[in-house]
Image: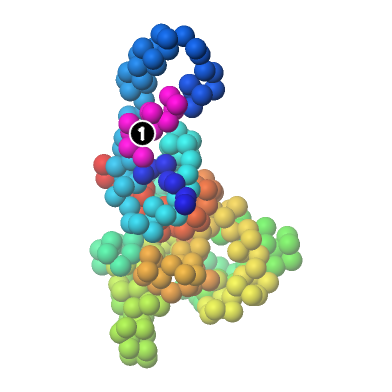
């Protein structure tokens, strides 16, 4: 059965380190026991205090999130985490964090609108099928970079939806309730104030249906999006985690380092990683 590093207490973590060291170079002298005790006291003094915080945060995560995290070195995890947090300097300080947690229980206000939204125009990198599309500057540039790479591989991506205001999302949600009923609408459409689209960092590729992942564009995006900082928001089999059924067309820009971190430590599930970062920054 898989053992997760965060399940160990700080004492157990220290004990395992000492055990590993002792086994690597055993000694016969009777004085080794007292030396080991002294080393244990020294390690307890020198251990990274962030490991205690890491244990607290990970223990507060949901059982499914805990199960998704592989066994590993806490120091390595923390180093990767800090690389991700440092990338916030690449985003505007005047707007929400690129790792802002927004879901069915974490919201933005009705009047929130990202600063500096850039309108998407027809261009040589990707196609658009609406005239009212816009993104935050960071996502706008990242989309162009992603699409140019796809174009170089003979694939033209089509963007169908980007930033949505609170009022737009309200009208959209109400529409789907009228069509499918409340229960089904809740699986496929966000209530106003809870949509990633309102952050100006998420987009839908076309076609917006379950066939997207089988199109040339879908196959290319699935294979390459993370290399350019784009993360699938609602993966298959995680409706109980994200609150939404699989949406193979919906991606959020979080940056390359965050995509690497998500894949390495969180089973490539965006929701788990962002929930972790949210809890980390609260403590």
Residue 10 image point, x, y percent: 33, 33
Q: Main secondary structure of the magenta part?
A: helix
Residue 189 image point, x, y percent: 38, 77
Q: Answer with left or right where residue 46 lies relative to residue 136.
A: left
Q: How many labels does the image show?
A: 1
Quadrant of the image for the C terminus?
A: top left
166 part of magenta stretch: no
Residue 225 image point, x, y percent: 59, 59
**Toward the viewer: 241 or 159?**
241
Residue 25 image point, x, y percent: 54, 18
Camera sees residue 258 = no
Question: Can you say whether 167 is above or below 88 in the image?
Answer: below
Camera sees residue 120 = yes
Q: State the residue at coordinates (36%, 20%).
A: 40
Question: Can you say whether 225 is above or below 81 in the image?
Answer: below
Question: Can you say whether 72 is above or below 39 in the image?
Answer: below
Mark 1 element type: helix
**Toward the viewer: 246 or 173?**
246
Q: Where does the magenta region start and end?
A: 8-19
**Toward the viewer: 225 or 183?**
183
Q: Quadrant of residue 212?
A: bottom right
- Tell me the residue that label 1 is attached to: 12
User: What colouring style does the render use?
Assistant: rainbow
Q: Answer with left or right where residue 145 lies relative to residue 33.
A: right
Q: State the residue at coordinates (36%, 40%).
A: 8
Q: State the residue at coordinates (29%, 42%).
A: 56
Q: State the residue at coordinates (35%, 16%).
A: 37
């Amino acid at each position: 059965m898989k053992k997760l590093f965060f399940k160990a207490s700080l004492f157990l973590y220290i004990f395992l380190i000492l055990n590993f060291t002792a086994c690597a170079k055993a000694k016969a002298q009777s004085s080794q026991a007292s030396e080991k005790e002294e080393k244990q006291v020294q390690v307890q003094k020198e251990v990274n205090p962030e490991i205690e915080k890491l244990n607290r945060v990970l223990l507060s995560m949901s059982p499914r999130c805990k199960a998704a995290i592989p066994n590993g070195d806490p120091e390595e995890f923390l180093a990767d985490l800090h690389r991700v947090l440092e990338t916030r300097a690449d985003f505007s300080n005047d707007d929400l964090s690129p790792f802002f947690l927004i879901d069915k229980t974490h919201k933005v206000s009705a009047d929130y609108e990202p600063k500096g939204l850039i309108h998407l125009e027809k261009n040589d990198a990707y196609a658009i099928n609406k005239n009212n599309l816009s993104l935050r500057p960071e996502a706008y540039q990242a989309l162009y970079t992603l699409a140019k790479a796809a174009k170089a591989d003979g694939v033209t991506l089509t963007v169908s939806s980007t930033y949505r205001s609170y009022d737009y999302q309200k009208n959209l949600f109400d529409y789907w309730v009228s069509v499918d009923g409340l229960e089904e609408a809740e699986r496929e459409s966000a209530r106003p104030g809870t949509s990633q689209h309102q952050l100006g960092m998420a987009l839908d590729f076309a076609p917006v249906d379950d066939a997207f992942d089988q199109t040339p564009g879908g196959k290319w995006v699935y294979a390459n999006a993370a290399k350019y900082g784009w993360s699938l928001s609602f993966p298959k089999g995680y409706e109980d985690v994200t609150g939404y059924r699989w949406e193979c067309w919906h991606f959020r820009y979080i940056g390359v380092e965050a995509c690497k971190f998500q894949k390495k430590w969180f089973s490539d599930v965006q929701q788990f990683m962002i929930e972790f970062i949210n809890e980390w920054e609260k403590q």
